Image: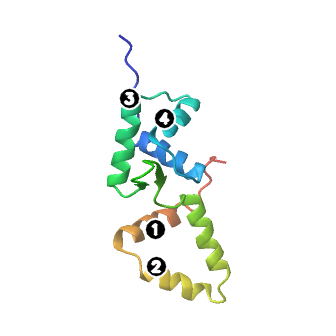
Amino acid sequence: MVVSPRRAHGSLESSVLQLLWSQHASRTGRQVRDALAEDGDPLAATTVLTVLARLEKKGLVHRDPVTKAYRAALADPVESAESMAEVLGRSSDRTAVLQRFTGALGAADLHVLRVALDGAGDDPAGA
């Protein structure tokens, strides 16, 4: 019996979301499974459907009740960050925009922002 290696927690959900973001269209469970298989990740249809159901329960994907196709509920993080930068760039008072934005964030989001800012000058290549 061949035992496949265990995945990192959440990695399959992340792969499915990345796929749905990149497709910019709704995809059935079979289409998601086939696309993952093309990327070298062959999975059982039931596995993919379970992941999609979990993502739907978390509000990260929506399922069309007629076509049974799934689409990402949220925007790609890269696109979201680019949109935020674009909006900030259009402002004549960046300080006011940033103060208003951060004033509307909750404690958890502020913590994530602080961690991101603390590492903003780090060179990921280590050079």
The tag on residue 114 is 1
Amino acid type, callout 2: Thr
Residues marked 1 and 4 touching at CB (< 8 Å): no
Secondary structure of residue under mark 3: loop
Res. 65 visible in picture: yes
Mark 2 vs mark 1, CA separation in Å: 11 Å
Q: Which residue is mark 4?
A: 33
Q: Nearer the viewer, mark 4 or mark 2?
A: 4
Label disc, if present, on residue 6 of the rendered structure:
3
Position of 50 relative to 89 (above/below): above
Where's residue 7, x and y in %?
A: 40, 33
Q: Vertical placement of 5 versus 103: above or below?
A: above
Sequence-wise, which precedes: disc 1 or disc 4? Answer: 4
Relative to the observer, which residue lies in front, 95 or 74? Answer: 74
Q: Is residue 70 left or right of residue 98?
A: left
The mark that comes first in sequence, 2 or 1, is: 2
* Residue that appears at 46% across and 68% down: 114
